[in-house]
Image (cartoon, rainbow, N blue to C red):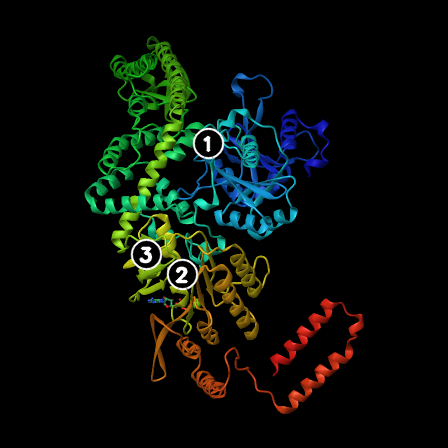
Amino acid sequence: MKRSEVDRSKLSPMMQQYMEIKDQYEDCIIFFRLGDFYEMFFDDAILASRILELTLTGKQAGLEERVPMCGIPHHAYISYVDQLVDQGYKVAIVEQLEDPKETKGMVKRDVIQVVTKGTKIDSNIDAKSNNYIANVYAFPYCYGISYADISTGEVYAFLVEGEDNKVIHEITKMGFREVIVNDSINRELVDTLRSNYDILVTILKDGEEDNEYSYIYADIEDIRIVQTLKHLLYYIIDTKKGDLHHLQPCQVIKSSMYLEFDANTKKNLELVETIRNRERQYSLLWLLDKCKTAMGSRMLKNTILNPLTNKKEILRRYDMVSLLSCEFILRDDLINALSNVYDLERLVGRITYGNLNAKDLLQLKTSLGQLPIISKILGELHYDSSIETFEELYSLLDRTILEDAPFTLHEGHLIKPGYNSELDELKKISSGSKDFILEMEQEEKKRTGIKNLKVGFNKVFGYYIEVSKGQCNLVKDEFGYERKQTLANCERFITPLLKEKENIILGAEEKIISLEYKLFMDIREVVKRYVGGLQKVAKIVSEVDMLQSFSIVSDTYKFTRPEITTERSLKLIECRHPVVEQVMKTEYIPNDIIMDKTTNILLITGPNMAGKSTYMRQCAITVIMAQMGCFVPCKSASLPIFDKIFTRIGASDDLVSGESTFMVEMKEANYAISEATENSLILFDELGRGTATYDGMSLAQAILEYIHDKIKAKTMFSTHYHELTSLEKDLKHLKNVHVSALEENGKVTFLHKVKPGAVDKSYGIHVASLAHLPNSLIERADDILNVYEKKNIKKETFTQTSLFELADEEIVEKKNEVEEKVKAINPLEMTPMEALNFLYDLKKDIQSNK
Ligand code: ADP
Ligand code: MG
């Protein structure tokens, strides 16, 4: 049964209420609170029952048929919401806004929040990563991008000038999973984001502005940035609804503040996850993360993706890392203190918005308790910012919240004695009466002589006196017992006195629970006043945690402090790939990477498996680590500050968008060439591999020349076209290096040692033999190679052995084919483009069969 086909006039009042709410939230699955359950109806129920594996039932709602329905217990809803949200659905939570006990007729209900991929807050979100909701706002000649983490309150924005491609690069690099766009945006961009990158995109018209949150953009002058922020906030406020004052004033990002690179580089260098498993383990992040707090880990991740470009700031971090490594005793104390600091940022988020419980406030207290220690250590280290220590807030929490308070706020047992006299009084009454009841049991036993008489309690009958069947005959009228319940083996009685005490106890308990809840909420309000200050401290603690982690990894893995030069020269002595080095079982061979002022391009040759790609990667990783303010995996290192990194590594097809390896390669090459400056680093790994030899080689050479003459970026270019090494003669800023291999008795050993000059053999066959291809096949390949090598001796640079020598008659046949093709066309009927394409194809035909 479909919702749209229902005769609404026949529906029960509650179902009508449901329909009205659903009308406003068409694109959401509605979790409709009914007593202790959240129920879903109609199509929502059919869909959710399938995804969540719930039983689909039905509800009488006034129609002939029952309405499809499924439900989940209210206390366990988060994991169900998460499952739906992770699959890209939005879930609207509808709550009862009135207490059903105190309401006549229908209870008022409404949406209290919408949960989406980018706006989860109460859910189990990864502690070590931010979860952002982003906004892309299209203006006539540029895009505004803003994003926020609702759980921590961080808000950022920046502008992207130019084409859609750049927007996609930014969005995918940051790993946004949900994006809001304005109405005038190019729909093709929306489709690409949705289908190629599985991003939840909501197209949203401009909404009304909410002055309550204008402080977030109050200091920003660029109206485009303000516009994108307003658009983002409109969505956040509309979905989250509650108090969002933990959202912080927006930080505007200028691209020049950070070392730029795109999602491909992030992926190729395995910065935050590995290519193979997409897991954190064995990524650079995994290696560097020795942070003690979740905040530190998140900052580290953000820093890996956004290394700095400001020399002063980078040196400041080096100084701190050095100092921490020298003062290792202080560092130990610092680490101990940090280990007891909880996620202040997300605690603050929950204090303002979301399901705060007493455990959260206890975690806040424990964290605050560490601040005086951290503050003292930072003072001793002459750290350049000091932290507030919030003694007053600590003492408030210490005086109020019970250490063993439960998770829920509706059972009492939250507030310590001595804080509120009314509460203490009620507790005294309640426990006094409980004592009275215990005493009463003893007295009744004595008075009646019934040995096994008991006083018990249950929810239905309250307090009662229980006498076993065997002794019931001892109950006399003069006791004043009133029979209440008969069970198989006993009888239960009450007396007026027992009921009187019961009233006092239950009345007091009800009052205690509601008073404790009120007191807790009052304390929450007080804590809210500290939110801004706590966020500041959280930022500093995150950075300190990240820096201690740098210091630890630098000691553990023997990293060195780099020197930042203002010259355009790079000198990495005995550089290693920090992750491969740790993961490898055998010894890692360090290599120098040297590009002096006059060298811009290193052309790297060497057999497969020699270590070319690793060599290039370790260079980029060293640059990134250096600009993060971390020490680097070298014996010594001096390098300039780079503005951007471009990489084309590996030959993975972009399967999602259905583009061939070659197309992807050329697009990435084009992106690099059009965006790079002389202060950039470019890594091209075997560029041109994806096409025919001549095509590939010519393109590779043209690209090298272009970079050499026009861009002048520091470039590492590995190639399997040995012919390219002769370019060294003509391009004075290009140097050949090669990775050697040792060949002995037909067996190859890889030395992984990079040396000056070119190499002339590819050893591909030996690699094949390492891969255990059949011996006969390897021998045959060797024979063929010998033939080629002999033939090739006389050949000029830029030619490559063809794969097949054709028999004479085949060549004749080919000629005839060409003749036939030429005869078949009429040049007068062709456009210039068609003619050119024809010529191109013809040439390709002839060439491939020459
Ligand atoms: P290429 O790109 O030349 O084909 P790779 O860079 O992929 O070679 O490296 C091949 C293998 O050699 C890698 O799996 C790596 O473990 C190992 N390797 C690379 N460089 C080194 C090195 N410097 N020391 C030790 N092993 C290395
Ligand atoms: Mg390689």
Mark 2 or 3, closer to the camera: 3
Q: Is mark 2 within 8 Å of ligand 1?
A: yes
Mark sitting earlier along the chain (3/1): 1
Q: Is residue 285 visible?
A: yes
Mark 3 or 1, closer to the camera: 3
Q: Tell me what residue is drawn at x 32 percent, y 56 percent.
A: 638
Residue on which the image places disc 2: 617
**SS at badge 1:** loop
Q: Position of residue 714 (x, y in %)?
A: 43, 60
In this view, the residue in front, 647 or 532, is 647
Left or right position of 546 against 146: left
In this view, the residue in front, 60 or 689, is 689
Residue 614, numbered label:
none
Compared to residue 347, the image places residue 271 above or below, namely: below
**Which residue is farthest top?**
478
**Regarding ligand 1, which quadrant of the image does it lie in?**
bottom left
**Which residue is farthest left?**
329
Image quadrant in which the C terminus is located: bottom right
Residue on which the image places disc 1: 249
Residue 638, numbered label:
3
Q: Tell me what residue is drawn at x 31 percent, y 53 percent.
A: 562
Left or right position of 761 against 804: left
**Three-letter code for the amino acid on which mark 1 is drawn:** Pro
**Three-letter code for the amino acid on which mark 3 is drawn:** Ser
Spatial distance from mark 1 to mark 2, Cα to Cα? 37 Å
Compared to residue 562, the image places residue 389 above or below, namely: above
Q: Is mark 3 within 8 Å of ligand 1?
A: no
**SS at badge 2:** helix
Q: Residues within 10 Å of mark 3 (few under 14, many from 20)?
A: many
Mark sitting earlier along the chain (1/2): 1
Q: Which of the 4 quarters of the picture holds residue 680?
A: bottom left
**Three-letter code for the amino acid on which mark 2 is drawn:** Arg
